């Protein structure tokens, strides 16, 4: 049986740390090299990296360069590359991914049944931010996506690594000029009845963002992109929920179980022991501080302070322990529990604040907030 030609596309801005290694991995894969076309579409290349690209092009004859001195943005860089591609199947890799494992033929075979294949991804645990991003990605790719996989319908897509048929890409008219072009692409494909699958036949390691400023900027883009997706594809999302109601409810339950446990404890389990502690503390304080302070530090105010701290710590421990158990059991490996506490205390709330900020900003100005991203 004849194997199809594949086009492997790398949209890059300025430079890519792992490009040479990724090309080597791709060409070492047993899939015939004469059926592999590599297209590097780069914006504003740095001089040293541009020289490296020229070396790679002279070394490997199946590499094509699409170079723009201006910043076109990922959407245009990717769409431009697809326009000159000649493969029946398209593979996409972002500049910050490292190909840990690749089996091209298995992906090609999976595309006989499915139309979009997302590659499994893991964040490199580098620094405190890398560890927190690792937890976030593991929650999705180890817990949530395997459940969504059973529906075979595309709902989300992380565009840093996936494959699709070229006729599918053309049918949905490729990437649109939106902030989360990958999720938008998945929704457009879903509306046309195309099938989705997440595969471990290609596994990618992703460099974490360098600092909190970059993370905030990315999450602003993702959060506003979510608003765009809801506005543009609410009908599809509702249809997905209706036709996959049990799956959707199960995912919601997985995500919000810690909140439900915390709410149950808050409503039904008494905290009267804290009031006894407050009275005991008040009695001890009354022997050592002046009457004026005792007016402020009465048993009720002490109890209320303790109660807030109790509920906060309870929420942190329930959420952290729950996420820790989910990931540790799924991956069969123990991790640093402190990172899961930081994930619950800082990462999730900050993400929620950014989402709320984007919603309010859009509600007032009807446009995206300022961010370092070219649509």
Image (spheres, rainbow, N blue to C red):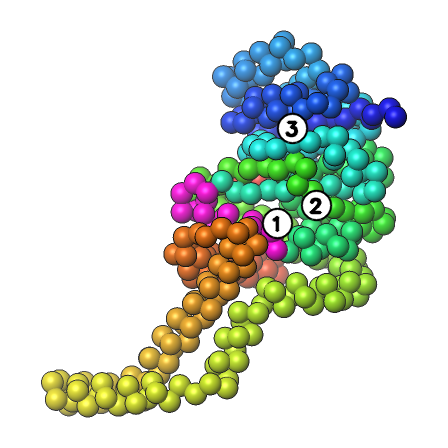
Q: Can residue 353 be spotted in the picture?
A: no
Q: Reading the chain from its start, which is encountered first: label 1 or label 2?
A: 1
| Neighbourhood count class around disc 2 (C-alpha, 10 Å): few under 14, some 14–19, many 20 upward | many
As displayed, is residue 277 above or below residue 233?
Answer: below
Q: Is residue 78 placed above or below 341 in the rendered structure?
A: above
Left or right: 141 as drawn, with respect to 49: right
Question: Residue 134 appears at what percent x and percent y?
Answer: 50, 47
| Residue 58 horizontal/vertical position (percent) | 63, 9
Image quadrant occupied by the C terminus: top right
- Spatial CA distance of label 3 from label 1 is 22 Å
Kindly identify the residue that appears in the image at 68 percent across and 66 percent down.
Answer: 250
Task: Name the residue rendered at 40%, 43% in the picture.
Answer: 127
In the rendered structure, the answer to whether residue 317 lies left or right of residue 283 reads right
Q: What's the residue at 60%, 51% (across, down)? A: 142
Instruction: Please give left or right for residue 305 compared with residue 106 in the image.
Output: left
- Queried whether the magenta region covers residue 48, the answer comes back as no
Considering only order in the chain, which callout, 1 or 3, is on the residue closer to the N terminus? 3
Give the number of the disc on residue 141: 1
Prevalent SS, magenta region: helix
Looking at the image, is mark 3 or mark 1 nearer the viewer?
A: 1
Magenta-colored stretch includes residue 139? yes
**Residue on which disc 2 sits:** 198
Q: Are the residues flagged by discs 1 and 2 in contact, CB closer than 8 Å?
A: yes
Q: Is residue 236 above or below residue 162?
A: below
The residue stretch that appears in magenta: 125-143
Residue labelled with disc 3: 10
Quarter of the rendering occupied by the N terminus? top right
Tell me the residue at 79%/31% (across/down). 89
Q: What is the distance, in whole Å, between disc 1 and disc 2 at their CAs?
A: 9 Å
Could you tell me residue 128's position as x and y percent?
Answer: 40, 47
């Amino acid at each position: 049986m004849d194997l199809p030609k594949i086009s492997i596309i790398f949209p890059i801005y300025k430079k890519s740390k792992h490009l040479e290694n990724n090309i080597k991995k791709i060409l070492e894969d047993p899939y015939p090299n004469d059926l592999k076309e590599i297209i590097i579409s780069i914006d504003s290349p740095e001089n040293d990296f541009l020289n490296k690209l020229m070396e790679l092009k002279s070394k490997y004859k199946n590499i094509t360069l699409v170079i723009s001195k201006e910043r076109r943005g990922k959407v245009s860089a990717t769409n431009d590359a697809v326009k000159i591609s000649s493969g029946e199947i398209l593979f996409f890799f972002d500049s910050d991914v490292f190909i840990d494992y690749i089996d091209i033929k298995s992906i090609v075979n999976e595309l006989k049944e499915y139309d979009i294949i997302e590659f499994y991804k893991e964040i490199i645990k580098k620094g405190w931010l890398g560890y927190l991003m690792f937890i976030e990605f593991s929650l999705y790719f180890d817990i949530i996506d395997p459940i969504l996989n059973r529906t075979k319908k595309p709902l989300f897509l992380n565009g840093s690594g996936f494959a699709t048929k070229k006729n599918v890409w053309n049918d949905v008219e490729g990437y649109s000029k939106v902030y989360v072009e990958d999720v938008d692409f998945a929704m457009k494909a879903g509306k046309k009845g195309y099938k989705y699958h997440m595969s471990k036949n290609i596994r990618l390691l992703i460099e974490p963002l360098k600092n909190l400023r970059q993370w905030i900027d990315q999450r602003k883009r993702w959060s506003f992109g979510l608003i765009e997706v809801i506005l543009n594809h609410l009908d599809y999302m509702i249809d997905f929920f209706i036709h996959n109601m049990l799956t959707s409810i199960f995912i919601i339950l997985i995500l919000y179980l810690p909140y439900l446990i915390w709410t149950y404890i808050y409503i039904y389990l008494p905290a009267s022991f804290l009031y006894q502690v407050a009275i005991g503390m008040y009695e001890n304080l009354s022997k050592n501080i002046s009457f004026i302070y005792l007016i402020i530090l009465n048993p009720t105010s002490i109890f209320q302070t303790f109660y807030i701290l109790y509920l906060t710590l309870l929420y942190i421990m329930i959420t952290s322990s729950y996420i820790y158990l989910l990931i540790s059991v799924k991956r069969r490996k123990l991790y640093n529990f402190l990172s899961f506490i930081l994930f619950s205390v800082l990462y999730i709330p900050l993400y929620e604040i950014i989402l709320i900020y984007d919603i309010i900003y859009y509600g007032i100005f009807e446009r995206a907030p300022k961010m370092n991203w070219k649509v």
